[in-house]
């Protein structure tokens, strides 16, 4: 079985589970729990820091869940919520021994990297429900990101000769990025043409495509720093769970803030 076929099967499986769970808030929360816990495990495993072992996820995991529940049920401003939990997490991190800047920075990074995405998924869901928008609008950034990544992968493999950041991610090329932007603009137009004017969709397509690229590049930089290819092999050709959410890390918040400003 080819690498592309394996990637497609796994993407369809998790995409199908997302669609099904997205229609029910309880199942959506459970779906995110699985990703959050395993992705947290992978992130700790990637860095293998001296002062961090796998028990650390049991310190951070409850606070990430509190963040999700607060956003979901209280629907408060995300910036205020993050500020309070940054303070709480800083205190917890400082209580660990020995205290170090590395300790503190990683604790905050862990919280940001794994907390921002699921929190914004719930913010997006709540906003769409509040405005009585179509449920398929909620699924747009997921479909867009997967489509964008697939186009970049296909055309980058076929025509990619000019590398963007060879030291960070040798497979990423200008050709793959360009094709992904162009095709993603068309995808955004056909998916959202009933909701927004053309000029807004043009801006959205370009912006989200670049945000997806930056999210992917950020995780590639993290893996390059510790000299590994994938965050894990749990998803076979897809690597680990972190490898599946890297682009979504920026596209979900990006689409949410685009939507609330329309």
Image (cartoon, rainbow, N blue to C red):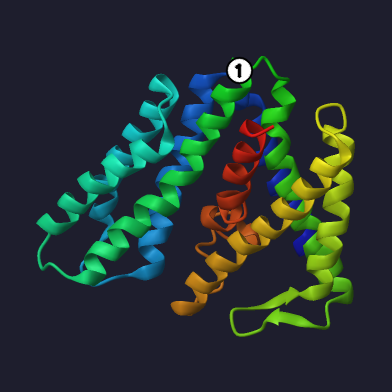
Q: Quadrant of residue 136?
A: top right
- Residue displayed at 75% across by 46% down: 204
Residue 17 shows up from this direction: no
Q: Is residue 240 above or below residue 83?
A: below
Query: Is 151 on the left or on the right of 120, as rendered?
Result: right
Where residue 47 sits, quadrant-wise, is bottom left
At x 28%, y 38%, the residue is 62
Q: Nearer the viewer, residue 213 or 130?
A: 130
Q: Is residue 130 above or below residue 4?
A: above
Q: Vertical placement of 198 versus 20: above or below?
A: below
Q: Could you tell me which secondary element the residue under label 1 belongs to?
A: helix
Q: Quadrant of residue 1?
A: bottom right
Mark 1 = which residue?
A: 129
Residue 238 locus on image (x, y percent): 64, 58
Give the x, y percent position of residue 60: 28, 47
* Residue appearing at x 35%, y 61% in the figure: 44
Q: Is residue 178 left or right of residue 248?
A: right
Can residue 68 be seen at all in this image of the molecule?
Answer: yes
Residue 39, position in %: x, y? 45, 51
Q: Quadrant of the C terminus?
A: top right
Picture coordinates of residue 258, whole percent (x, y): 66, 39
Front-most of 9 and 206? 206
């Amino acid at each position: 079985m080819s690498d592309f076929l394996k990637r497609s099967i796994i993407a369809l499986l998790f995409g199908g589970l997302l669609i099904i769970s997205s229609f029910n808030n309880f199942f959506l929360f459970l779906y995110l729990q699985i990703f959050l816990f395993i992705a947290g495990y992978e992130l700790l495993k990637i860095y293998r820091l001296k002062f961090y072992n796998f028990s650390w996820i049991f310190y951070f995991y409850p606070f990430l869940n509190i963040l999700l529940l607060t956003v979901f049920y209280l629907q408060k401003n995300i910036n205020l919520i993050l500020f309070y939990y940054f303070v709480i997490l800083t205190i917890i991190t400082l209580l660990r021994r020995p205290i170090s800047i590395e300790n503190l920075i990683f604790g905050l990074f862990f919280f940001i990297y794994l907390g921002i995405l699921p929190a914004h998924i719930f913010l997006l869901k709540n906003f769409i429900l509040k405005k009585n928008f179509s449920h398929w609008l909620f699924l747009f950034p997921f479909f867009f990101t997967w489509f964008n990544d697939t186009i970049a992968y296909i055309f980058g493999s076929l025509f990619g000769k000019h590398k963007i950041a060879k030291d960070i991610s040798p497979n990423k090329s200008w050709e793959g990025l360009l094709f992904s932007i162009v095709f993603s603009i068309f995808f955004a137009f056909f998916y959202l043409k009933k909701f927004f004017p053309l000029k807004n969709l043009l801006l959205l397509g370009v912006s989200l495509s670049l945000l997806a690229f930056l999210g992917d590049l950020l995780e590639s930089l993290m893996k390059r720093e510790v000299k590994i290819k994938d965050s894990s092999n749990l998803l076979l050709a897809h690597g680990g769970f972190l490898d599946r959410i890297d682009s979504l890390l920026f596209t979900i918040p990006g689409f949410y803030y685009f939507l609330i400003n329309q």
